[in-house]
Structure formats: C-alpha cells, structure tokens
Image (tube, rainbow, N blue to C red):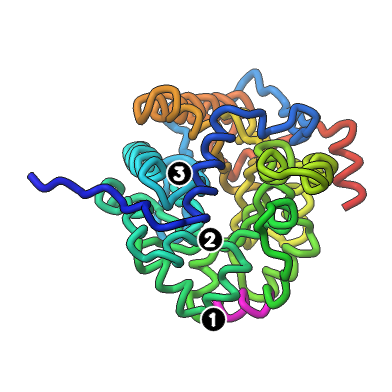
Amino acid sequence: MSVTPPLDMSVDDATARRKDAHLDLCAQEEVAPVENSTLFDQLSLVHCAMPELAADELDLSTPLFGKRLRAPLLVTGMTGGTERAMQVNRDVAQVAEALGLAFGVGSQRAMAERPELARTFAVRDVAPTAVLIGNIGLVQAVRLGVDGVRRLQDGIGADAMAVHLNPGQELTQPEGDRDFRGGYELIGALVKALGGDRLLVKETGCGLSPQVARRLVDLGVQTLDVSGLGGTSWVRVEQLRAEGSAREVGAQFSGWGIPTAAAVGAVRRAVGPGVSLVAAGGMRTGLDVAKALALGADLGGLALPVFRAHQEGGAPKVHEVLTTIVRALTQALMLTGSRTPAELKQKPRVVTGALRDWLASL
C-alpha cells in the first residue's frame, strides 16, 4: 500500500497560511454576523392541506453542467491548499458523491502559485460522478488568462469553473487586491473558450445585483450564484485578521451587501427563466432552500454549516446534516403541493417587510 507523502510547507507560503487562518476563523469565530439577515424570514410559503401527492412521486432531481443531481444542492467552494483543507475537500466530496449533490472546491489560487498543491483540490477519485466545480478569483483569473484558468479546471477534472467576485473581501484583507479592472473582458473570453454552459460566476457574500447579473448573462454566462448577505461575511473574516484602521473600516462593512433573498428575486427578474441560479449566502436549512426556489433559484448553495459539521464529526456528520436538509426540502415541496422544484416556483407565497422593499427598489 502506497502512502501519500505530506505536503512540504517549509516554503514561505502566505496563501496557504491565510487559508488555514480562514478555516480557524470559520470554525471558531462569529463570521456570520447575527445582525445580517438573508431576509428569508420575511418570506412565507403557503400551506397546502390537500397536496394530492405521494412521497414517492416527488422528484427533486435538477440538471447542472450536463449532469443530473438527485437534489438541488451545491456544497459551495470552501478551501484548499493545505493538508487540513485537503481532508475537508475529500471528505465532503465523498458525501456529495454518495448523495448525488454538487461540490465545489475553494479558490485554486494556491494551486496556481504552487502546482504541487493540486492534490489538495483533487477529489475525482472519491467523487467520480459528482458535479465538480473548480474555483478561482476574478482578479487572479485576469492575471492567469484563459489558458491559466483552463489548466486549473483540467488539473482537477472539474465539470465547470467558478469565477468568484470578492471586492469587499479584498479591500478589507491586509494583503488583498486593489485593482478590479478587466473583469468583464476576461469573463467574455472565458465564455468563448470554456463555454457559457461550463462557467459559474459567483459572489462571495455581498450579493449579485440585477445590473451585474444582466451584464454577465449578456456576455453568455448561463449559471450565476448570487451569494448574498446573511451568511459568512468574508469582510468580517478579513476584519478579524486585520489591525488598526483596516480593522475599523472592516467592521463598518461587515454588514455590506444585498440580502440573499432579495438578490435571488431581483436577479431572477433581471435575467429571465433561461439562466441557472444558485442561492447561497446564509442557507442553513432545507426550508431556506425551498424559499429560495420559490423566489426563482434553481439550487441552494451551502458552505459554513457543512464545514462546521465536518469539524464536529467528519464525513458522517456532513452526511447527517446534508441528509436532514434534503429531507426538509422534500417536506416543503409536499406541504406546498409541489411535485418538483419547478412547480414550487409557481406556488403562492407571501413577501413582507424589508424583503418586499428590497424587491421593489431593485
């Protein structure tokens, strides 16, 4: 039996150290500020007392990147680049494979900087049929160019590539980027090279506005992740790492963004029915996912509850948490008289308070 040698972390690797620091903060600190709200609490689904359905008639299957998921759930990109991150990726990917869900790796920036770190993102051997999504930040993608992004995708055998947008995080991060030019041009080039049906453009907790979403769709992007306000605030994560005035400014902006529910509803109206929409940012339960579907999302994306489940009990706890989410989503479909997620979009719902105001304003 061969034994995989440990990674050589003797090289001064700021990216790897930062990734482990992020994991520590997400495991231990309050990185989802309680004052931030997804606004899903201001959306109610209408109960159907006579659903006229049997449980075995429900069909949660959902297409994504040329494959079919057993339920509309994506474990969104979290980590990579270190031994610890490698174990998280492999354990969670294995559960996603078992449950028929999609899985995304964290930012592959570390892999781009040090190709030997590719194996910390490599999960195809434990998730051979799962929808696997690579990941790189837009600023890094601009620097790498189309060929560099394609190498990252091919290097892990991903079905699609996510390009994440995180100016809020970068501006708060002490060593973060400050130049965000050239993004639309790069996205247009990636659409031509990889195909708009193999590209996911995602925010990272501050939300996609309908204006940005419309422009991305006009470039040919066919899958968007709104990743709105209400879950992990990467501005807060970087604020906790920062010092002095950067920490003070980060505190002011840790509640910055478009709440997830508002982003889902507004982006769906802006892009129409032909675009696949992922609702992420504070998704915690199957009922959250059901509400997002009712507003127009096609999938729910989760990260923090999955990571914390892994920290608590490894792959078995991740399996338990994701199974519970699927079960609650299934119950929400039944109790709204919806045989499929698509039918749930057509059911009545009640929108109140700030969510109603956000949707009217956007």
Q: Earlier in the sequence, mark 1 or mark 3?
A: 3
SS at mark 3 in the image: loop
Location of mark 1 (residue):
192
SS at mark 1 in the image: helix
SS at mark 2 in the image: strand
Amino acid at pointer 2? Ala
The quarter of the displayed image where residue 353 is located: top right
Determine the CA span between mark 2 and mark 1. Answer: 15 Å
Residue 360 screen position, x and y as percent? 91, 47
Q: Earlier in the sequence, mark 2 or mark 1?
A: 2
The quarter of the displayed image where residue 141 is located: bottom right
Q: In which quarter of the image is the N terminus?
A: top left
Q: Which residue is drawn at 57% across and 29% down?
A: 286
Amino acid at pointer 1? Lys
Amino acid at pointer 3? Ser
Q: Residue at x 62, y 77 (%)?
A: 186
Q: Which residue is drawn at 51% across and 68% down?
A: 197
Is residue 345 placed above or below 190 in the rendered structure? above
The quarter of the displayed image where residue 285 is located: top right
Location of mark 2 (residue):
162
Location of mark 3 (residue):
61
Residue 175 screen position, x and y as percent? 65, 57
Is residue 263 placed above or below 154 in the rendered structure? above
Residue 206 screen position, x and y as percent? 74, 49
Determine the CA span between mark 1 and mark 3. Answer: 29 Å
Relative side of 262 to 328, left or right = right
Determine the CA span between mark 2 and mark 3. Answer: 22 Å
What range of the chain is rendered magenta?
Answer: 184-190
